[in-house]
Amino acid sequence: MTGLFIDGGVPLFGSVAASGAKNAALPLLAASLMMNGSSTLTNVPHLMDVFTMLKMLNALGVRAEMQPGNRVVINNTKKVKHIAPYDLVTAMRASFFVAGPLVAKTGFAKVPLPGGCSIGSRPIDIHLKGFERLGIQHSIEHGFVELKVKSLRGNSVHLEFPSVGATENVMMAACLAEGTTVIENAAREPEITDLANFLNKAGAKIIGHGSACITIQGVAELNGTDHPVVSDRIEAGSLLIAGAITGGEVTVTNCVPEHSAPMLEKMREAGLVIGIGPDWMSVKAEGRYTGIDFETLPFPGFPTDMQAQMMALLTVANGTSIIKESIFENRFMHAHELMRMGAKIKLDNRHAVISGVPKLAGAEVKITDLRAGAALILAGLVADGRSNIYGLKHLRRGYDDLPGKLRSIGARITD
């Protein structure tokens, strides 16, 4: 069984660059299905999920290739197929992003029910209800969602929850609808803004992205364009916490500090020294920081994708911390692995109470999902002795060489 081996207790110092965002790159790639001609994406992270999506595009008749320099070149010149391969969609939940672009482009799509990390229920009914408002009919049989539409028509779409995936899927489909679509209670994440900017470059007419009300004026076609993937705020936050938890001083570059504002606010509240610039943020730990309370919420609240990493940070804080997980009902699986390293954590449904300890101890632990992987690595960095971390397939889905980046600022990590 392959794993990472971390010898902890070494403060990290230096500067490290964040990669492009997984959660932005995947819908951008899906959106290219609707665009005629050639598109080029830059700042694309080297991740398993990205390569899965590239396989998806190629299987659907679009030529998509990763090139040196974190570039993906996409050529959409042939007829797009309408059946998404079962093995690719079930391997990665984000593959369901192809549903909206496929049905908008071809009038028909057959997409398997999605898979992905087991962090809780993420039903697609919000997507389907949004599609219905655009005139798209759906049926679910034998594990496949079948979507059909004769004529896409703009409409008002009220999302019962500000789902990122549903907002993006409906927004993409609405770009080729006749008339105007207004998405109310839309998600506001930076990755949605990045997708809207990409679509607008391709000829879409979208306004209001980044707010809870997005308006899309349908157009007849979209054409290929070039676009840089926005920086990964979750990776940037994970790298910043690595500096904090080890008592070091780390600067993260190639990032957008305002996208990490909720996390930075909580780190300041804990007593950590935070600095920010136009495209960088830094942390310095001056003595032992204190416990804090927070609740995960849709953007601009504290991101659920940073909850596990922040929990790792709080295991060695001075005092007690309380975390409420409001987004996913099964996202405390990493807590049990942290407890194997000596953390004191009590779980009660969606709440976790963390009593800080002076030290963690190295142990053998297993990654249960993507963000849990980052949390266990962070804990290993500060633990006494050696930690053996297994289950790296989850980590590689969403982090572009996290071990290598941590080694560049002093971490003792081998594989």
Image (spheres, helix red, strand yellow):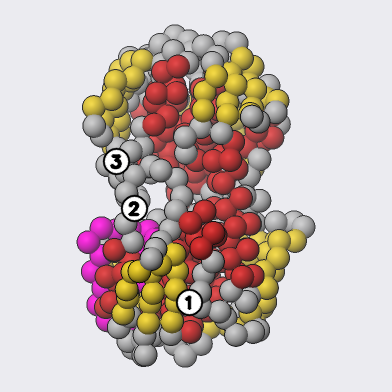
Camera-side residue of 100 and 44: 100
Mark 3: secondary structure: loop
As for residue 200 lying within the magenta part, the answer is no
- Residue 375, position in %: x, y? 49, 30
**How would you rate the neighbour count of disc 2 (Cα within 10 Å): few for under 14, some for 14-19, many for 20 or more?**
some
Q: Earlier in the sequence, mark 3 or mark 2?
A: 2
Furthest-right residue in this view: 68
Distance between mark 3 and mark 2 Cα atoms: 10 Å
Residue 305 can be seen, yes or no = yes
| Quadrant location, the C terminus | top right
Q: Which residue is mark 2?
A: 122
Amino acid residing under circle 1? Leu
Question: Residue at 65% of width from left, 31% of height from top?
Answer: 2
Mark 1: secondary structure: helix
Q: Earlier in the sequence, mark 3 or mark 1?
A: 1
Q: Which residues are magenta?
A: 154-172
As for residue 167 lying within the magenta part, the answer is yes
**How would you rate the neighbour count of disc 3 (Cα within 10 Å): few for under 14, some for 14-19, many for 20 or more?**
few
Q: Which residue is mark 1?
A: 102
Distance between mark 3 and mark 1 Cα atoms: 31 Å
Q: Is residue 182 left or right of residue 341?
A: left
Residue 335 in which image quadrant: top left
Relative to 404, residue 337 above or below: above
Relative to 14, residue 393 above or below: below
